[in-house]
Image (cartoon, helix red, strand yellow):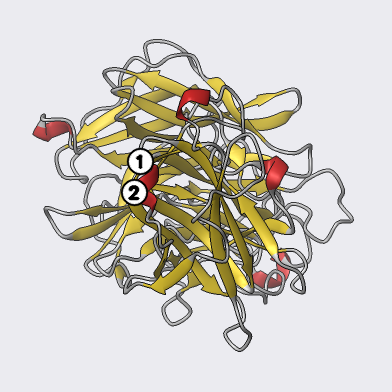
Amino acid sequence: MKKYLMLDRRFLNPQAMENVEIQITTPKKDIGHNPLFIQDKPWEIRIDNGYPNVLFDKEEQIFRCYYTLFTDDSDTEGTSLEERTSRDYLPRMDRVTSLAYAESKDGIHWVKPELGRVEWRGSKANNILLLFAHGTGVMIDDHDSNPDAKYKMVTKVDIPGQGAHMAVAFSPNGKDWSKLIPWPEHNPPADSHNLPFWNAEEGCYMLLSRVWQDGIRMTTLSRSDDFIHWTEPKETLRGRGYENQVYSMPVFFWNGIYLGLASLIHEGDRREENFDTVDCELTWAVNPEHFDFAAPGQSLIPRGEGHYPTGAFDCGCIYASPPVIGSDGKIWLYYMGGNGRHTNFRESSLARAFWQPDQFAAMVQKDRNSDSLLTSCRLKFCGSDLEILAQAENPDKPVLLEAQIHHIWTELPLSGFTFEESRTENTSDGWISISWPEGMEKLEGSQGCIKFRFKNMKIWAVRGDICLDGHRLWEGADMENEIH
């Protein structure tokens, strides 16, 4: 049974849709527990963007969080709240960026253990893993048989006055790390979240990072077979002008596609209300070489209310981690929320929100008073099952949901598979089954398109005994297999 999300543009035919638009499903913030931890240690002088990497170790049954912070920042340290509200932050080039570690048994209550790894002002009683580490990305590698490389890290070693370079490290347990190994080739700016992941389809490691080009920030992709030698970074996502530049973009693999959590910084007009703030938007890709925005301009994790210093802990900036799938089936999005503008004074905290599986972005009605129409691309039918993940937008109003199958070359419905003959039935897991008296198995091996007519519904996904068989309605159609 194949499943297609509504944000996957391969599934729908844009020439045959009416009164629909895509709408991001905002994850629900964990209001009862947020923020999960704040910057409350002496060496956490400024967590800044944080670039969180929240991982769940299934063997150890523990959550681990790796986050970037400044352990030396003279303009932040010792500056009173009153002074912070009366002038702008003036970062110095001698700031020290470091990597810190926290852990949790339940993903809610976090501990910053005294690791004894790094000396900070005469003491190793802290949770610092590395000094001079910028934008560190950490992954758990389930496919590597080497137990000493279960955890892998990519970071930008940045020593003030001595230059910067890319490096990697390995760990058996997430706490004890090997010496940093410099990249043999290439040295991109990478002054952002450097996120590594395994691409099973290509059988290689990939790294999403960032460079500057044409005066703006953009996300890049590199490949590696051994996690040490990396290819030259190539552009994979560009934002929208100065106003929406991609600062960082963690990704995760879901249902055959990649979903990105892109942090966008807003520059270009100091008078704008959102100037110098950072929002998070959803992106997607079939191949990580090219990402696109799922719903441009729609925030994925909305910033909190207010402004520095009295606003919500996440009213200024949002930087996400790749999500964690909970034992409850929910998709937990951990993020660092900052309470001020990006280049000004702010404090950052770890928080979380959750999605239900597959409910990332829905097709909804533009005009709630008229019916809406979705039409699939060319499909091949492989059996009897067809289901749609949908929900009433307003439970107090009647809903309409019906479907029909039609020929590729005409708008005529197939006899026995019309709107009027379709039947729906709710299932126990939130999906709605769609069937016709004829039975879709009658069409096995044939090609056609499915139309969905609906009202007062939001639609997240379609699944069933169907598979993509062409991008557009009649592009490259196989006349011999068309439904007759």
Q: Residue 45 placed where, x, y %?
A: 50, 57
Rendered view: 229 above or below 432: above
Q: Quadrant of residue 125?
A: bottom left
Circle 2 packing at 10 Å, graded few (<14), some (14-19), many (20+), is: few
Q: Residue at x 33, y 72 (%)?
A: 108
How far apart, in angstroms, are the residues tagged by discs 1 and 2? 5 Å
Mark 1 touches mark 2? (CB < 8 Å): yes
Q: Nearer the viewer, residue 296 or 114?
A: 296
Query: In the rendering, which numbered label is found on residue 433?
Result: none
Rendered view: 259 above or below 60: above
Q: Residue at x 86, y 56 (%)?
A: 272
Give left or right: position of 376 versus 333: right
For mark 1, what is the residue?
444
Q: Is residue 134 visible?
A: no
Identify the amino acid type marked 2: Glu
Q: Residue 197 placed where, x, y %?
A: 35, 34
Q: Quadrant of residue 26?
A: bottom right
Q: Nearer the viewer, residue 353 or 466?
A: 466
Rendered view: 161 above or below 101: above
Q: Residue at x 73, y 44 (%)?
A: 244
Residue at the right extreme, as displayed: 271
Q: Residue 380 placed where, x, y %?
A: 43, 37
Q: Could you say whether the residue bearing mark 2 is in a helix, strand or loop?
A: helix
Circle 1 packing at 10 Å, graded few (<14), some (14-19), many (20+), is: some
Q: Residue 448 placed where, x, y %?
A: 51, 40
Q: Nearer the viewer, residue 156 or 198?
A: 198
For mark 2, what is the residue?
441
Count of residue discs: 2
